[in-house]
Amino acid sequence: MLEVKDLHASVAGKDILKGLSLHIKPGEVHAIMGPNGSGKSTLSNVLAGRDGYEITSGEALFNGVSVADMLPEERARAGIFLAFQYPVEIPGVSNMEFLKSSMEAIYTARGQEPLDAVTLLRKAREVCKLVDLDQQFLKRGVNEGFSGGEKKRNEIMQMLLLEPRLALLDETDSGLDIDALQVVAKGVNSLRSPERSIVLVTHYQRLLDYIVPDFVHVLAGGRIIKSGGKELAHELEDKGYSWLEGHDA
Amino acid sequence: MSNQAELDKLVRSEYSAGFTTSVESDTLPPGLNEGVIRFISEKKGEPDWVLEWRLAAYKKWLEMKTPTWAHIHHPPIDFNEVSYYSAPRSMADKPQSLDEVDPELLRTYEKLGIPLHEQEMLAGVAVDAVFDSVSVATTFRSKLKESGVIFCPLSEAVHEYPELIKKYLGSVVPQGDNYYAALNSAVFSDGSFVYIPKGVRCPMELSTYFRINEAKTGQFERTLIIADEGSHVSYLEGCTAPQRDENQLHAAVVELIALPGATIKYSTVQNWYPGDAEGRGGIYNFVTKRGVCHDNAKISWTQVETGSAITWKYPSVILRGDNSIGEFYSVALTRNRQQADTGTKMIHLGKNTKSTIISKGISAGRSENAYRGLVRISPRAENARNFTQCDSLLIGDQCGAHTFPYIESRNPSATLEHEATTSKVSDDQLFLCRQRGIDPEKAVSMIVNGFCKEVFKELPMEFAVEAGKLLEVSLEGSVG
């Protein structure tokens, strides 16, 4: 699904990722943890193609194709979904309108007929329910006046509707209370399937109590310094990141 | 490719209404003098008092100076290089029905999406089609007449309803009101006249479609709408012009009279040729629009301005009567080198008068977009209220947005609110859209449409869709 090889990337001329490698197979859930400034968010933004995030060497292949050769919208249509750490507001554009445009673009690219308005609305209502968002949110402007937690749940709602092949969740747990965290986790878990891969970028182990990963990687100084199973997260929780910093050569 | 590059790519768009109609025209040679005014008046077979009125306006105009206070820049206009009258030759014999109208003219309107044959028309919309200096056709007239509604070219109304014209022409925008209004009063050619009788709700939307075709020709139409007591009318105007390298002048006057209890809703979709990316050509649009509200009357202006090289217009409401209401909803989009200085004046004279101003300015490219608005509360306007909201949206970093609000309150019981915001189509918004698979072009137009939503919902439904599309087309050239 995703093959990242010795990836170097810079943001505004500053090197952030310094030789990151990662291999993700279909159906797997990977957690990427690490201290602030380790490059966690850079990784998801590089993969999604945000302006200003530049691959300087190495490569990232998504189903065998280098993402560097694809525009951000092409990556999205190929099935890469980024749940944003700070979802922006688009005033006056209703969530429903936004979902419809997004769905049309993605389905058309897949060679599928986009859902008709009635089916889309029904589906959208279902996923709203799943993430505990009132249906009124579909009529409101994208993230317009949403609370922090509502914005995050809105991201998960979009993800459930668009059914990506690779979901990147960039600190989706930050700023969530425990109830909201469980709701988000329920949404993400419902998406787990043998064809789909999920990358959880997080600072805290807490999220991983609810979404149990197959692999945990620790990122520091722009590289993965340790990988392991889900127990690695617990170890980190006990000992802190400083425990590993000696590993970084 | 970066968002900026994507936006840059959108730069060159075609102006879809930029074609020229080839018809033989009788066009006056350029130049302005008394003889020209007499010629126009004679061409229209006007009674003497109209000619006198024109000549008086011309005298005033000669003594006036071009206004310089607006935030626009252009070389001085040589008014002797403009032709003040042009009409398709085929219109000289005054066709009695659509069958007699030159098919080339009808095709022009069809191409613009305004079929004039009634069976093909948008149901429920009557159209007056003005081509250069004359009205080509006015549809649904007989149907309107059944309810007593008069909808005809102004040049005809002068003959058929002289008492109404005498009473109201220039009553809201006097001949010497301002430089361009004076010019218009001297040389006005055609325009629409509307009268809605007492208590009548006009059974359909009325609209006028203005088309400038002939080169080097100015269009100086005049529209007069009278809504008698308790009546109701919704009126829409649309404007386009061919793509030409030289600038063309458009100086119109619109007067609205809302008698006690009447409501006039006036919507404009202005898409005059805006000039090219380097700022060559385009219409100079200097327009005076004003309405007067008597007791309990309401006037609502809604405008979507996407065209013209220069837009200078301030649709205003004089709230003369008690409890009257004035509204102004505006979307002004500028791109390339377009300049817009537009806004409104709300003059509160009566008690308990209320006004609302919602202005959305969108600037792209190297354009300059200014909102200029005056809210005046006179000493006897007890309990007057105004709410003003001016939002500016910037696309790219070479354009300008300006807000010039003027507030004059001479009555302490007034309530005035003013809100203003400036924002940019942010990279984050664009990235969110693109990350969800949406094309950058579509994303920008979606973001801009969202920004304008409050204004679009004020447009008659058929035209709200039109306006959204127009914005999309216009935005295809948004950032340079």
Image (tube, grey):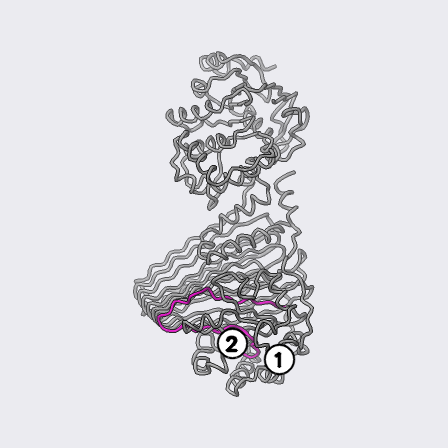
Report if residue B309 is visible in the image: no
User: Magenta segment, which residues?
Assistant: B185-212
Give above or below for A38 relative to B377. above
Give how far apart the Cα atoms at labels 2 and 1 are.
18 Å
- Residue drawn at 67 percent across, 71 percent down: B216
Does residue A27 belong to the magenta stretch? no
Residue nearest the observer in this picture, B419 or B82: B82
Residue A248: x, y in percent? 59, 15
Up the image or down, A238 lies above or below A159; here it is above
Kindly identify the residue that appears in the image at 57 percent across and 51 percent down. Answer: B472
Quarter of the image with the N terminus of chain B in it: top right
- Amino acid under disc 2: Leu
Q: Chain of mark 2?
A: B
Residue A181: image location, x then y, percent? 41, 25
Give the residue type that dot 1 points to: Asp
Query: Residue B118: where, in percent of width, then height?
Result: 53, 66
Image quarter for residue A72?
top right
Reading the image, the residue beneath label 1 is B93
Q: Is residue B205 magenta?
A: yes
Residue topped by disc 2: B154
